[in-house]
Amino acid sequence: MGLLEDFHHDFLPRFIDAQIAFHDGDAGPNNALWTDTDPVTLFAARGLCESGTDSVTRTFDRVASEFSAVRDYVWELFASGVSGDLAYTVAIERYVASLRGEPPAQWELRVTHIYRREEGHWRAIHRHADRKEPDRRHSG
Amino acid sequence: MNELDDFLDTTLTRQLEAEQALVNGDPGPRLAMTSLQDPVTVFGAKVPLKRGWEEVSETLGWLASRWSNSTDYRFDLVAAGVSGDLAYMIGFEHIANSVLGIPVEPYTLRVTHIFRREQGEWKIAHRHADYVPIDQTLPSEASLR
């Protein structure tokens, strides 16, 4: 077995770069950093819930194709952890991008990711994303 | 029994009981399961971001003080995993309770939990929860990631 990939220094910067490419219309770099092995799950920003590699990959392809002209893409990382073959990140993603050719708009998402190390390489296995403003129903 | 089965049978069961007590107005068991170590975070269904034991515990107490009379709490597990001192659980919470004494429409949350083992005990290090439409029908623009 070769060198174990370092989560924070080797993997995470590449994963974030892949999200930039994603919002420029290219899902390839992101998909390459997601697992090929179930279980894999996606709780997407507007309520879509997917599981299984085929449906998650198809969703990424479809959604990426709707984004373009990304700029100012940043993660504000609030928490992360690594142990054994699991890791997680808690962040707010901020970016400006065009959705379906509309004028570019500012996006802010609360995002939790879970990652699993498979044969020495980290791969994302779960994304939970929602708009930063929480639903105020039932807040009393 | 493998590590995941053991985790599901013990820690997940305890955590669900704690969530059930919380939506019924008792934050005690959930506070007892919350990590005291940084980082501890919440992306709540009702609060945007809480960080650190003080903020998280205060929030749980505040939420519990408004909740009572839970008539339903169910959890649908979608995925879970354990490795080293980290574990995760992903699923849907179905909740019916009262807010400030007034019964609310049952609601469903998408939930992601991260657990961290500390001195041999599993604690909740992160919770991310948001609302899902009860009927699961989504508008066409819900293709946003």
Image (cartoon, coloured by chain):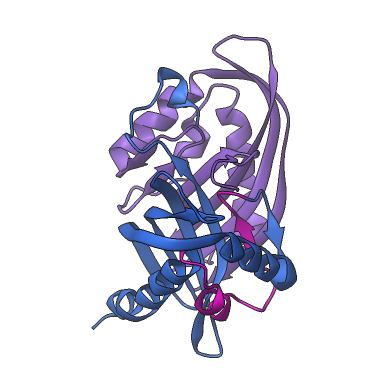
The quarter of the displayed image where residue B81 is located: bottom left
The image shows residue B10 at horizontal and vertical percentages of: 34, 81
Above or below residue B16? Residue A49 is above
* x 58%, y 75%: residue: B34
Q: Main secondary structure of the magenta part?
A: loop
Find the residue positioned furthest to the front: B101
The quarter of the displayed image where residue A75 is located: top right
Above or below residue A21? Residue B3 is below
According to the rendering, which colour does chain B have? blue
- Letter of the chain shown purple in the rendering: A
The image shows residue A87 at horizontal and vertical percentages of: 53, 63
- The question of residue A79 being in magenta is answered with no
* x 73%, y 65%: residue: B55
- Give B43 or A27, whichever is nearer the viewer: B43
Whether residue A57 is visible here, answered yes or no, is yes
Find the residue positioned furthest to the bottom: B119
* x 55%, y 39%: residue: A130
Above or below residue B119? Residue B129 is above
* x 56%, y 51%: residue: A112
- The question of residue B26 being in magenta is answered with yes
Q: What span is colored magenta in the figure?
A: B24-46
The image shows residue B41 at horizontal and vertical percentages of: 64, 62
- Please state if A119 lies on the left or on the right of B35 as rendered: left
- Please state if A83 lies on the left or on the right of B97 as rendered: right
